Amino acid sequence: MLLTISTTHQPAQDLGYLLHKNPDRVHNFELSYGEALVFYPESSDTRCTAALLLEIDPIALVRSFKAPPGTSRTLGHYVNDRPYAASSFLSTAISKVFGTALAGNCKKRPELVQQAIPLAFHLPVLPVRGGEKVLRDLFEPLGYQVEAQEHPLDTAFPEWGGASVFSVTLTHQIPLTQALSHLYVLIPALDREKHYYIGPAEIEKLMNHGEGWLKDHPHRETIARRYMVNRRALANAAIEQLFREESLPEDLPDDQQVEASVEKPMNLNQTRLETVVQLLQAEKVRSVVDLGCGEGKLLKKLLEQPEFSRIVGMDVSHRILEIAARRLKLEQKSERERERISLLHGSLAYHDRRLQGFDAACLVEVIEHIDADRLGLTAHNVFAGTGAAVIIVTTPNREYNALFPEMPADRMRHADHRFEWTRAEFHAWAEAVAAKYGYAVAYHAIGPVHEAYGPPTQCALFRKSGSAPSRDA
Amino acid sequence: MKLSIPELSLIVLIGPSGSGKSTFAAKHFLPTEIISSDRCRGMVCDDENSLTASKDAFDLVHYWAGLRLKRGKRAVIDATSVKQDARASLVKLAKSYHARVVAVVLDMPEALCLARNDQRPDRNFGPHVVRGQHRDMRRSIKHLKKEGFHHVFRLEGEEAVNAATLEVQPMWPDRRHERGPFDIIGDIHGCFDETLALLAKLGYQITETGSGDAARFTVSHPEKRRVIFLGDLVDRGPASNRVLRLAMDMVDAGVALCVPGNHENKLERWLAGRRVKLTYGLETTVNQLEGESEAFRARVRTFINSLVSHLILEDGRLIVAHAGMKESMAGRASAAVRSFALYGETSGETDNYGLPVRYDWAAEYRGKATVVYGHTPVPTATWVNRTICLDTGCVFGGKLTALRWPERELVEEPAHALHYEPVKPLNTEDQAPNGQGANTFYLDDVRGKRIINTRFNRQITIREGYSMAAVEVISRFAIDPRLLTYIPATMAPPETSKRDGYLEHPEEAFAYYRKKDIEEVICQEKHMGSRAVVQVCRDVTAARHAFNLEEDVLGTVYTRSGRRFFAEAALEQAFLTRLAAAVEKAGLWRELATDRLTLDCEIMPWSAKGLDLLQNQYARVGAAAGAAIPATISALRQATDRGLALDDKLTAWQKRAENLDKYRRAYGTYCWATDGLQGLRVAPFHILASEGQAHFDKDHLWHMAMADRLADADPELLQKTRYRRLQLADRDAEAAVTEWWRDMTEAGGEGMVVKPIPFMAVCEENRLVLPAIKCRGRDYLRIIYGPDYTEPEQLERLRQRGLTLKHRNAVREWALGMEGLARWAEGDTISRVHECVIAVAALETEPIDPRL
């Protein structure tokens, strides 16, 4: 990984003083994942160039890297762009190798430190997630002239297009110390991957190195979020610090969670859960199993109603059940309360005896996460398998998507949705299932009903034929 | 007195304190069989005499006894048990496990009991307690039979106790000493002619002598085979009386065994003079018996009364019963067991024809023994788990079916006429033998810690966390599980090479097999594309039948993680249509007598499926390196020109430029553009399964020959796999094969796979050896270990790689994969096949170095 810093300041060799590195020698530094080298490919009165070369050892990187929880140790790590691409390693190296210059110290030429001098930074390989626009958005407001050339993925396969990896030259008349702090923050923000664990200490680094410029940067939020590698809580904390004197922006959309963001303004999830609880109450059920309970939002609402004497949440993800247990504070509940509620790891792909014997089963925003060709088996396990007298199913109404302003026409509300149905499609499915398993079906609208498109969420309530529609309290 | 006690019984000793129960128990039973209430008191509260602990102590007595009975072990209750309510709960316990319950009353003189208690310092209760117990005991004796004890033994006085001996009787159904070969015949229902014809087909010689009451059938088989009648000999059909005579003569002569059916049970009640409705075909039998003598009818009644509900044969490997047998009831005796054996269980509901809906016990059957039964008419006898129903509705115009055991062959005789109009047609869909169980995946088959018995001398344990992860992954991302009958096993690399410049080399693979006493191996070219499993059927009807599908598809193609291979369904079906045509042209449908095939394949190019990985991982790294290296070289050259001492660095970076070229060429070889099926190449290398068969009994030469024939049938789409055979003793041949490997890999090939010739090769103690070892090429490995891995300082460190787990899982997954296919072929329920699929997926989630 290479970074060159050139100046045409007169005398150009002053760069050596500013960087605290003699242009006529080779400087070696040990780093945790390899070594750093500083040398000067050119050094004259008119032009001086310093090169920072990082030799990253990919094997040491793989073998000692402790991946943060949630990331997988993929094949990728030995075959890795880190030895070549500018990344958080470069920031670490800058602070270690050019620490004096970054801090703005220079004994021999103190007057030069705050002086704006002509500087050119060349990064032959700078990964930019998001393309050239992001690169320009981040550097141009700070006064840099940006020259960027995207490398192709592979010249042998021109149809593959660009690699999102750029050869970049940044030129500016600027004090070196400032430029180094810009690079320190912005290179990892462009790359959005970090070689170390992102903890709260990261906020401090961002604040330190962003001092004096980040607060006024028009894209400060983007920078903070990208610098924190999208770790939401940390990014929000950082943004909060940046906006300390101003009011916070209304919403901090997470680009992964489309569903939450498109549905959020209408508080749809809340309405949905309340409707389901009301329907269950009207059916006078006592025991409920929530199939695909997720973090337990419905379970929490059910717990608040004393008439539900037995509540069970089932989900296919063991991890999310742990979150549910925490949110429901299961550990802290009294023995009596704990007899009311339990969580099960299971899957709708299977016949599960533990799900039998409930008055009602709920599938709230679940079926759209199942491949359409597996719905038949799912219905079998839910209807024939649980035998619940009341079954409630909710799912998005695709027609309503037209009313979401930010939603592209071909997108669904969530990346994991396998389908979203129109009302007609949902009704066709519901009626077929009801007929097959001996249920009667009724529909309920959830959320504001649009004249042409209907409600945002559709809901079917299945009642087992032959069973009493409701039981006496 | 000789105390004759059934093998599985709960023995309740009855007698007051001091009557000698513990001494008696210790004399006749193992210490582990005796459950003493005093001991349980001690266990729960440290004081064997504490009366306050009674309730908890008896809870423990019951729990403990229950566990033993569940496992088929007898238990002896050493407590006074002089009170009726104490005994009642024990009787109930025994019956819930279908065990016999035996009372042994130690009827000692009161004085003796009192005297014994006086001598025991730990007994601190007064004489009135013992007197009370004695009184209760005496009062109990005459009620014991009524209370539900099957056997009551009263030992009066010390002498009787001392003289008592114990004799254990096998349970009635226990005939494990009886061995085949057998011919097991399903429901006959008076179809006498069909029975004779079937017996003749099976090779029995039958002669009939005499007439009237003196009529006798003499039946024999040259190979001493015997018949087992599965009950329902009578009713509905034209000659129940003659069938009865034949069966009784054969049983009397020892040529046949017989279990009773529900129709015999009803007939017996009629014979006993009870009021029975003459319906469901009994009226025909009654008619036919009215033409027989009183003596014959008496013989029939005795015969039916002598039949045992079900039989356990052949050291426990075979169970026969009329309506089936659950594992928890097999070999036991109770009214519930008898009822299950004769009638099965019903769900309490009735179907559209007003007939009771039967509980599908076979779908849930997980026992080790094979259960052969009848009772429910099915169109054709089919294996479900380890069970088979042989009632093929002969009397309704179906056929009479026999199962040859242990050959497991079916022999059939079509009905000579429709003898009796069935209430519901014989061939309706919901009567398919695997109707209910066919589409049901039981969570209990995959949940928690699993121990899976495979037929390959391997018992494989799956840890709970991994099976949970597999259930999640397969539930969320895999294809329809009905089609997912197999997930390929991981493949191990050889031990790491010590040669300069090599991480992997074939010599370690050869050395491994030599060490395992394998004489010959096959070395197959390893294609570099994406692994795919293909389920292909002859037509959509065959696919519906094979996988119980509702949709019209020809099968599917999926990846090694069970995901759909082709994003577009239309392309998938077009692919399968081409493949089905190739199978047809190669003549494999006919030759393998199948309408479906399961193939292990590699589909090329890699870029067809792996484009995302190629671009975002491999090409992106190549692009970064491709830009960084020249820039670095130029900076270094400028610096060395200035006289800076950076020549070593310059040389090293120049070397990197060379390595990068090789790296980019390595992955580039596996990329080319495709358009639909155009450009796609498929190399099948395992013909895994066809209808009723898993082909792991054929060697790799057979598989290669089949694959070659397929490839010849459609050379545009299908590709052959080049291979060489190698005698491991022949070092010259080894050198030649190694040369072949080097040539292939230098020309851009991934490498080769070394396999023993047999599919399931074993070494000493019948242990499976690695089924295959992949020897990857030197340049291919740059994709795995990075462009510069061949540099000595990198290679030296990379040689430290842990292969043990990888090798272990390669064998375990292989065994599981083949076990699943074998279960599928044998007609096990899909849930039991799926158990193996999930197990492989679970092992695949174990954290193992992904570069291996």
Image: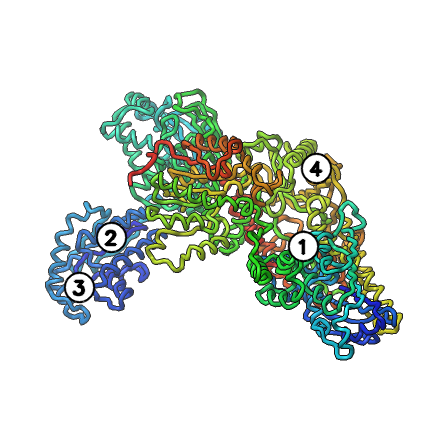
Question: Is B604 situated above or below A326?
Answer: above
Identify the residue at image location x=16%, y=67%: B117
Q: Is any atom of residue A458 visible in this view?
A: yes
Q: Residue B656: where, in percent of width, then height?
A: 80, 62
Label at residue B773? 1
Tell me where residue B584 sits by quadrant: top right
Q: Chain of mark 1?
A: B
Q: First in sequence, mark 3 or 4: give its number.
A: 3
Q: Residue B635: where, in percent of width, then height?
A: 83, 66
Q: Chain of mark 3?
A: B
- Secondary structure state at the residue bearing disc 1: strand
Q: Nearer the viewer, residue B163 or A402?
A: A402
Q: Is any atom of residue B203 visible in this view?
A: no
User: What distance separates the C-alpha of mark 3 from that of mark 2?
Assistant: 21 Å
User: What distance separates the C-alpha of mark 4 from that of mark 1?
Assistant: 25 Å
What residue is disc 3 on? B18
Tell me where residue B564 sits by quadrant: top right
What residue is disc 2 on? B3
Q: First in sequence, mark 4 or 1: give its number.
A: 4
Q: Are marks 3 and 1 in contact (CB under 8 Å)?
A: no
What amino acid is at disc 2?
Answer: Leu
